[in-house]
Image (cartoon, grey):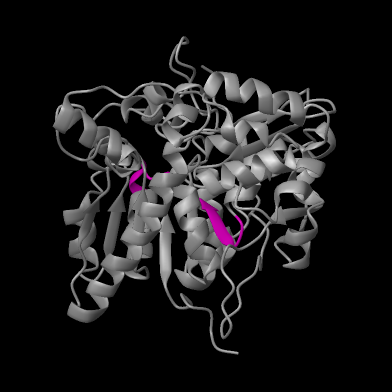
Amino acid sequence: MGRLPLEGLRIIDLTMVLAGPFATRLLADLGADIIKIEGPTRWDVWRGAASLTIGSRLYPNGEAGERPYNRNAYFNTQNRNKRAISLDLASSEGRDIFLRLVEHGDVVIENYSPRVMENLNLGFPVLHERNPKLVMVSMPAFGLTGPERDYVCYGTTIETASGHSSLLGYPDGPPMHSSMAFGDPIAGLNGALAVLLAVRHAKRTGVGQHVDLSQLEATIPLIGEYVLDAAVNGRPGVRRGNGHSSMAPHGCYPCAGDDEWVTIAAGTDRAFAELAGVMTRPDLVADERFRTPLRRWKNSAELDDIISEWTRTRTSAQVFAELRNTSVAVGPVRGADALLGCEHLNARGFFEEVQHPEAGTFPYPGMPWRLSQTPVSIRMPAPCFAEHNREIFLDLLGLTEEQLDELYRSRVSSTQPIEVNG
């Protein structure tokens, strides 16, 4: 088998929370050497607090432990296959060490607001002078220019700013969030692609460049048809709940059991006839309310009631089994527990067991890719805080033990998060 696809690519990772760490996680999975930098007093907020007296679902078995910042599920899911160091970039010593590290890197990626790197005097011109081949990817919420450039937000607010929330919800209700902060992973996917494109250019030309990636602009294209409708017809998007703009039936239907649901969509006459047959309601095909696609759409509420009466007599698995070999699009609504037990996913080896020194051993979501010549896997668990200080400072940058001890004494670096009161 060959080397991992991105082996030999070194990325200095200043990102935190989800959008940036998801981008670098994808690249780490493919073999890139990710060096994640966290400040001694300003670490990735997805690690959580440095000390806790109570646990939560974010920690294995609901227990925070002595070092909860190494056990948080949020952080550990998105930061596998990476190395981590602690370094205060606001200090002159930390800045100098960072610039030395830049000489050994191919990419710097950050998702701060635009003013942060500028205030640290670590903008692209400074980094480019130190390493002309370096690629820098900046992922601020609203881009590096424009009147809103300095606004700070998260994936949930990107949902609202990009128009997504205006389309989520029911016709007679308010806008809603997806609850999953989809703006973050969308930006992360775009960020990973941006790294690869810019690195390819740098390898070909010998010159790096600065990528300005707006998380807002990465998310808007996912509602492109609504933007086009507004531009052409002057119509705002409308909330439809589980309904569709032109198809019926199209919805999520209740099943027997506690909080069991199944999704059903039948967009053609053939699919609707097959659905009616499985329901033992062939009369629905000739019913004037449902005889054509347009009539089914106009009478979708009545049709949904009829389908719900049928699905309530069956489990979601039974509905799926009865419809799976028809033209009807059907799928049970799965929770995380059902995913872990999914025969198909487990047959493909999607979940990988990861042994973390402080969080324990549990299955984690694996790779979406199956590469025949260069198979990828979760090679390392997410790093504990500053776990790789010695590797990076001593082995890569050539600092001495005395210099590292001085970094600790001056709090330019640390081996554990330092809580600052106030």
On screen, 246 above or below 131? above
Q: Residue at x 24, y 29 (%)?
A: 150
Is residue 15 visible in the rendered image? The answer is no
Q: Is residue 412 left or right of residue 263?
A: left
On screen, 20 above or below 67? below
Q: Is residue 308 left or right of residue 242?
A: right
Is residue 91 covered in magenta?
yes
| Span colored in magenta | 80-93
The image shows residue 261 at horizontal and vertical percentages of 72, 32
Total residue callouts: 0
Q: Is residue 94 left or right of residue 290?
A: left
The image shows residue 23 at horizontal and vertical percentages of 45, 54
The image shows residue 316 at horizontal and vertical percentages of 77, 38
Dividing the image into 4 quarters, which one contains the N terminus? Answer: bottom right
The one nearer the camera, 109 or 196, is 196
Q: Quadrant of residue 356?
A: bottom right
Is residue 392 covered in magenta?
no
Q: Is residue 14 left or right of residue 387?
A: left
The one nearer the camera, 41 or 31, is 31
Q: Residue at x 33, y 27 (%)?
A: 163
Q: Residue at x 34, y 67 (%)?
A: 196
Is residue 219 visible in the rendered image? The answer is yes
The image shows residue 262 at horizontal and vertical percentages of 69, 36
The one nearer the camera, 278 or 119, is 278
Q: Quadrant of residue 301?
A: top right
On screen, 153 above or below 145? above
